[in-house]
């Protein structure tokens, strides 16, 4: 058995020298795989040496087993080194170029509608307006009656409504906050009210069932249409750029009298007429007017003592005009390809 043990040790030494010599000459991954199968594969020569241990007595097997395990570790370590070398040479594995800048982590941002709203609020805050918010689920008395929409008034048909019951609805406008604020404090009042509103609309590129509005209200003694036009003109020039003009066109809103639609000169053609403005040179941006005396009375103000103006506009519409967006549905689809542009 002593001679057999010596013969096994000789085979171990010979295998180590031969296998390592062949491994150093391996030039590609196919040759490396052939080497692995022959020497350290499941049916390779190393496995055959382990099988031969069964022919030795129990006193010799532990030492011979340790020597075989040492050989096994040596061959596997050298195999891994050659694998790493070939991986780097062939480009099959990942490479790291330390000179390249790191990839920044993707972070989110404000929705484009909120970005525009923040700019709008900043303009009005510099004019002395405070920001107020109110409930989206509103009482019919605030949303309609107190704003001079009596029951069965045809103007209610223009605001298709989501009703919860006979008295409660999803607000169709942020205007109810006019009444809520005036009932809670004496004049003067100077507020803007941003918020989500709801209309039972047929959804298309220019209509949505939910959208954001910004309402404005200024009440004091001797407030006039001149104050309204000055405020609106300042807002338009700050948001859309200097040189923009505004014009008032007669319109009807139950809660203002007189009432107007507000247009600004087209940003695309500078008022000359183009496809964007329908060749009119003007683009409608908001509705406005002087607060109706009935609204003052419903709010507890004396219309003989105070006057005021109100205006309202859609945030998405202003955003669409500002950035050339042609479909209001994009604001609610959460498509990162759209949102990441802003």
Image (spheres, rainbow, N blue to C red):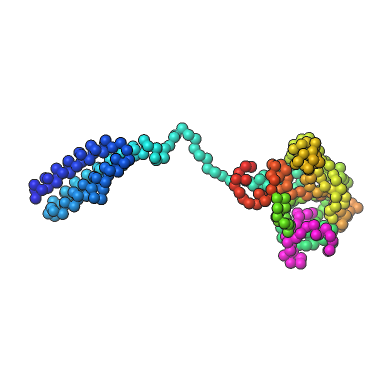
| Residue 25 placement (x, y as % from top left) | 26, 35
Q: In this view, does 239 lie to the left or right of 293?
A: left
Furthest residue to the bottom? 166
Q: In which quarter of the image is residue 112?
A: top right
Q: In this view, does 85 lie above or below 60?
A: above
Q: How many labels does the image show?
A: 0
| Identity of the residue drawn at 74% across and 49% down | 314
Location of residue 22 in the rendering, given as x and y in whole percent from the top left corner: 24, 38
- Say whether residue 251 is left or right of residue 40: right
In the picture, which quadrant includes the C terminus?
Answer: top right
x 26%, y 46%: residue: 37
- Magenta stretch in the rendered image: 151-178
Q: Depth check: give the residue in front, 226 or 103.
A: 103
Is 187 or 52 nearer to us in this picture? 52
Q: 46 and 273: which one is in front?
A: 273
Residue 233 appears anywhere in the view? no
Residue lying at the far top in this picture: please name it: 99
Left or right: residue 71 versus residue 259 is left
Q: Does the magenta stretch include residue 74?
A: no
Left or right of residue 334: residue 211: right
What secondary structure predominates along the stretch shown in magenta?
loop
Q: Does the magenta stretch include residue 157?
A: yes
Question: Quadrant location of residue 162?
Answer: bottom right
The answer to whether any part of residue 23 appears in the image is yes
Q: Name the residue at 13% across, 53% down.
A: 55
Residue 113: percent from the left, percent from the top?
68, 47
Residue under the image location 76 percent in, 36 percent down: 269
Residue 138 in the image: state x and y as whole percent: 74, 60
């Amino acid at each position: 058995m002593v001679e057999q043990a010596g013969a096994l040790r000789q085979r171990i030494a010979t295998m180590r020298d031969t296998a390592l010599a062949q491994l150093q000459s391996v030039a590609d991954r196919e040759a490396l795989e052939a080497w692995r199968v022959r020497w350290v594969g499941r049916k390779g020569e190393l496995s055959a040496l382990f099988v031969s241990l069964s022919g030795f007595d129990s006193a010799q097997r532990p030492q011979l087993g340790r020597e075989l395990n040492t050989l096994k570790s040596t061959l596997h370590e050298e195999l891994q080194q050659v694998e790493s070398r070939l991986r780097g040479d062939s480009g099959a594995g990942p490479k790291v170029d330390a000179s390249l800048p790191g990839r920044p982590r993707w972070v989110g941002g404000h929705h484009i509608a909120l970005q525009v709203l923040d700019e709008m609020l900043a303009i009005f805050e510099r004019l002395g307006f405070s920001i107020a918010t109110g409930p989206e689920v509103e009482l019919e008395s605030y949303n309609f009656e107190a704003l001079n929409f009596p029951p069965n008034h045809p103007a209610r048909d223009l605001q298709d409504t989501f009703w919860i019951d006979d008295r409660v609805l999803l607000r169709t406008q942020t205007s109810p906050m006019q009444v809520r604020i005036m009932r809670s404090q004496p004049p003067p009042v100077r507020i803007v009210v941003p918020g989500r509103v709801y209309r039972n609309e047929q959804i298309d590129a220019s209509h949505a069932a939910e959208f954001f509005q910004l309402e404005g209200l200024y009440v004091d003694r001797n407030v006039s249409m001149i104050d309204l036009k000055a405020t609106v003109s300042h807002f338009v020039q700050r948001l859309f750029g200097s040189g923009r003009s505004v014009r008032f066109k007669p319109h009807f809103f139950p809660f203002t009298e007189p009432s107007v639609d507000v247009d600004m000169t087209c940003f695309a053609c500078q008022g000359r007429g183009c496809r964007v403005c329908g060749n009119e040179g003007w683009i409608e941006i908001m509705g406005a007017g002087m607060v109706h005396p009935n609204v003052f009375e419903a709010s507890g103000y004396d219309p003989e003592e105070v006057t005021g103006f109100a205006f309202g506009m859609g945030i998405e519409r202003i955003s669409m005009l500002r950035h050339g967006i042609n479909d209001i549905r994009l604001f609610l689809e959460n498509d990162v390809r759209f949102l990441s542009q802003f």
